[in-house]
Image (tube, helix red, strand yellow):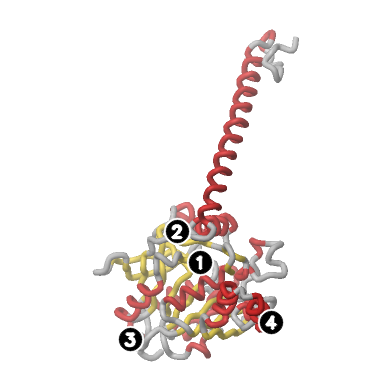
């Protein structure tokens, strides 16, 4: 591997792996890519592309698979729809429809087989070339008010090598993430990563600092991925390649830093978090928020009252059953639902 040009090259391209099957959202994702599921009225993948563009990355490569044609259609022109909206004078919706096709210069390449995130990133090598690049996983939705990617790009520019995003998680959840062993640096919330473990048991985790789906990678990662054998699950893991890079000298494209993210993030690949993201973003919309929040408060109050009523009934039944058991003859526990001895 040659010397990394990370200190002088500028990050200009973003890679978005989007080849997953979305099995956690079946049956909704049987015929619809999970990336196209709406968060309020915009598909999840568009938020990710908008994040890349906001960080100055207008060249976007999506790694797709079979059944993902809807992604290409969404970021392409829809001439018939545009003309219909134009004829109706619906200029607001027309602008929204045109936005997705003008948002970025979007390219596509298919991942032939589901061989892991590392393999998906490797599919981007011909497009990316020899410059550092960003990887954004479609399941992670970062609140636009808490920008993360620009900070990561600045750290990569200053320190070279690769940069990953980290969050602190409960030790009971470390088995869901790749976790990092770290050393402090002279920057707040920036650490040097010395080792990485993919989805460890709690007892084997080097820390509770977990990797989330934002990376700024040196191009040397491609050489490492080509030599990385299948790991956990029989797939080529990006975490394994990053572990190798963390132990290589900077002159060979090594070193990996982590940026600790403390902002708002949603995992739209998780059903509960997907709902939280939808509720949060809908409640903050000027056009939807006031009415939606009013309904939401009423709904929560109704649910709370219903739960209190059910809880009160259960407590009364439990108390009555205990009383019936205490009054049974000859020490028997022939309790009656009304609390009256059935004898």
Distance, label 1 to label 4, CA atoms, is 32 Å
What residue sits 60% from the left and 25% below the top?
A: 315
Frontmost of labels 1 and 2 is: 1
What residue sits 40% from the left and 73% below the top?
A: 149
Q: Badge 4 is on which residue?
A: 80
Which tag, 1 or 4, sits closer to the chain's start?
A: 4
Q: Position of residue 6 (x, y in %)?
A: 35, 85
Quarter-wise, where is residue 243 in the image? bottom left
Q: Secondary structure at mark 4?
A: helix
Which tag, 2 or 4, sits closer to the chain's start?
A: 4
Check the image and name the residue furthest to the left: 186
Q: Badge 3 is on which residue?
A: 251
Q: Secondary structure at mark 3?
A: helix
Frontmost of labels 1 and 4 is: 4
Frontmost of labels 4 and 3 is: 4
Q: Badge 1 is on which residue?
A: 140
Distance, label 4 to label 3, CA atoms, is 53 Å
Q: Are marks 2 and 3 in contact (CB under 8 Å)?
A: no
Which tag, 1 or 2, sits closer to the chain's start?
A: 1
């Amino acid at each position: 591997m040659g010397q990394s040009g990370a200190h002088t090259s500028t990050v200009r391209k973003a890679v978005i792996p989007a080849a997953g099957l979305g099995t956690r959202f079946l049956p909704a994702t049987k015929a619809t890519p999970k990336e196209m599921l709406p968060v309020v009225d915009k598909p999840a993948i568009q938020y990710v592309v908008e994040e890349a563009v906001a960080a100055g990355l207008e060249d976007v490569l999506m790694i797709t698979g079979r059944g993902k044609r809807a992604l290409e259609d969404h970021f392409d022109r829809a001439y018939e729809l545009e003309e219909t909206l134009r004829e109706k004078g619906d200029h607001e919706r027309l602008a929204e429809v045109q936005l997705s096709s003008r948002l970025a210069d979007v390219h596509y390449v298919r991942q032939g087989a589901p061989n892991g995130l590392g393999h998906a990133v490797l599919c981007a090598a011909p497009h990316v070339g020899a410059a550092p690049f960003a990887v954004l996983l479609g399941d992670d939705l970062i609140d636009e008010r808490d920008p993360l990617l620009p900070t990561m790009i600045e750290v990569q520019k200053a320190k070279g090598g690769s940069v990953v995003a980290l969050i602190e998680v409960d030790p009971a959840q470390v088995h869901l993430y790749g976790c990092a062993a770290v050393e402090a640096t002279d920057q707040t919330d920036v650490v040097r990563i010395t080792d990485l473990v993919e989805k460890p048991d709690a007892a084997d985790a080097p820390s509770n600092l977990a990797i989330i789906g934002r990376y700024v990678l040196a191009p040397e990662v491609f050489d490492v991925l080509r030599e990385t054998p299948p790991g956990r699950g029989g797939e080529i893991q990006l975490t394994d390649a990053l572990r190798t890079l963390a132990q290589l000298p900077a002159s060979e494209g090594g070193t990996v830093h982590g940026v600790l993210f403390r902002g708002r993030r949603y995992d739209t690949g998780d059903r509960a978090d997907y709902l939280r993201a939808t509720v949060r973003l809908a409640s903050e919309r000027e056009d939807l928020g006031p009415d939606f929040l009013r309904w939401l408060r009423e709904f929560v109050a109704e649910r709370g009252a219903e739960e209190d009523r059910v809880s009160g009934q259960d407590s009364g039944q439990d108390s009555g059953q205990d009383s019936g058991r205490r009054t049974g003859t000859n020490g028997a526990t022939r309790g009656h639902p009304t609390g009256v001895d059935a004898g």
